[in-house]
Image (cartoon, rainbow, N blue to C red):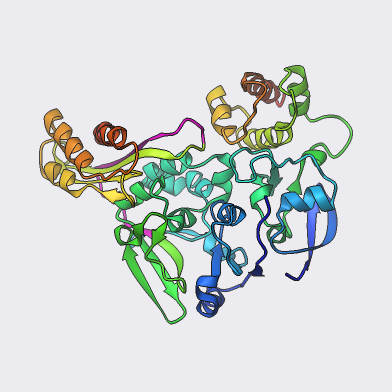
Amino acid sequence: MRIPKFEYFQPSSIEEVCSLLYKYKEEAKVLAGGTDLLVKMKKKEVIPKVVISLKGIPILDKIEWDDGGGLRIGPLVTHAAIVNHPMIREKYNFLAETCFKIGTRQVRYMGTLVGNICNASPSSDAAAPLLVLEAKVKLLHLYGERTIPMEEFFIGPFQTILDPQEMVVEIQIPKPLPYSAGSYLYLHKASSVGETLVGAAVLLTMEPGEPICKEIRIALSSVAPTPIRAKAAERILRGKRLEEKRVREAAQVASDETQPRSRAWYRKEMSKVLVERSIIQAMERIQ
Amino acid sequence: MKKRLIELRINNDSYDLAVEPQRTLLEVLREDLGLTGAKEACGTGECGACTVLIDGKPILSCLTLAIEVQGKEIITIEGLTGGGDLHPLQKAFIQYGAIQCGYCTSGMILNAKSILDENPKPSREEILKGLEGNLCRCTGYNKIVEAVMEASKGED
């Protein structure tokens, strides 16, 4: 399988990337890890005239942390870099764990977290965990920048809010709260690289020493045109005692919030099961 | 598109090449340099047959542009030992019958090497997880996992 011809640029600054995007607009594609873009090009699903590689800007592979702002992940940070990062394992273990579930060993060493969300697959394994972490995405344009919540980033299957002239320069993840833990559980098709059929992420914060849910966020992937937050389910648990019956009810409501198009019965049932299990796993991780 | 002059460092040798930007490392290895150990099977990043080591990491050469790996240390199965004796992983694969048609073997061995370099004493589960991106249609994987376990013992 051959990649169609294109004009290749490897700029050495972010400004140059933006200038090229400004000039070529829809004709250009930004290349990071290549595990999605080059496959689409081989299949002739995407045929860009211009490919702009980020590899000439090594600073883009930075993982940065500060006490005020939290975590910032650049567009060349691979899944493997997140899995192996001691600070992420300590403060955001659930994100490291999620990235370990993505793709295969080779794909984790090549593919990037930013690339994963830019691909905007409804079944992205990174999306639901980033939604519950209330991550933000910083977008840069030759003439400005904007930072938008993850929830507004996905607008449809394989579609994002990203303008053809913009690039994602970082994913921002707020500081983790005390007495909180996350969980991401998924079911996928039979092969190891099989697409995820249902993914459920939970980020739970409890009252210290009490089985009371102070804050909870629930997100699901592969069960709607985009990854979604299950906010009605969150409302059932927020501020309440975490009892078996209430957790079940919330899981049912989360399942009702999904809009799967294919294998709908299975996906709805498994949404319920995985949300319940994720809540329980997050609880166990706090205690 | 115009060809670009690039320099690749492969198996400790340096190669000057003129390549078009859309050509993959796999195409250049096989077609320009005659290094046919890395194989193309799926071409879309699922099977691992094209795996090579780039700066020690297991990388799919079918989804890597040749012009993007200049200045990096590329190791293919041909350069695993630097000539002479076989690598302990190669010996273990032979000993355990972990090869049949051989199509997956070079990718399997190079990925296994990267696993052992990262974790010299992996558990069976860690080997299985590490090799999940290398498909084999012949052996049923047990012999491959046994061979990697054996090679890990030998590295004491």
The answer to whether residue A66 shows anywhere in this view is no
Residue at point 43%, 73% (across, down)? A140
Name the residue: 34% across, 47% down: A128
Quadrant hosting residue A66: bottom left
Chain part drawn in magenta: A172-192
Closer to the camera in the image, A127 or A132: A127
Instruction: Determine whether B22 is above or below B155 in the image.
Output: below
Q: Name the residue: 37% across, 47% down.
A: A91
Taking depth in this image into account, of A75 and B21 the one nearest to the observer is B21
Task: Give me the residue at 30% from left, 61% from top.
Answer: A152
Magenta region includes residue B135: no
Could you say where residue A124 lies in the image, as x and y percent from the top left?
Answer: 41, 47
Establish if A1 lies above or below B120.
below
Task: Kindly tell me whether residue B31 is visible in this rendering.
Answer: yes
Q: Horizontal and vertical percent for residue B143?
A: 66, 19
Q: Nearer the viewer, residue B57 or B21?
A: B21
Would you say B39 lies left or right of A65 here?
right
The mark total stands at 0
In the image, is residue A224 above or below residue A268?
below
- Report if residue A181 lies within the magenta region: yes
Residue B16: x, y in percent? 84, 61
Residue at the far left in the pictured view: A240
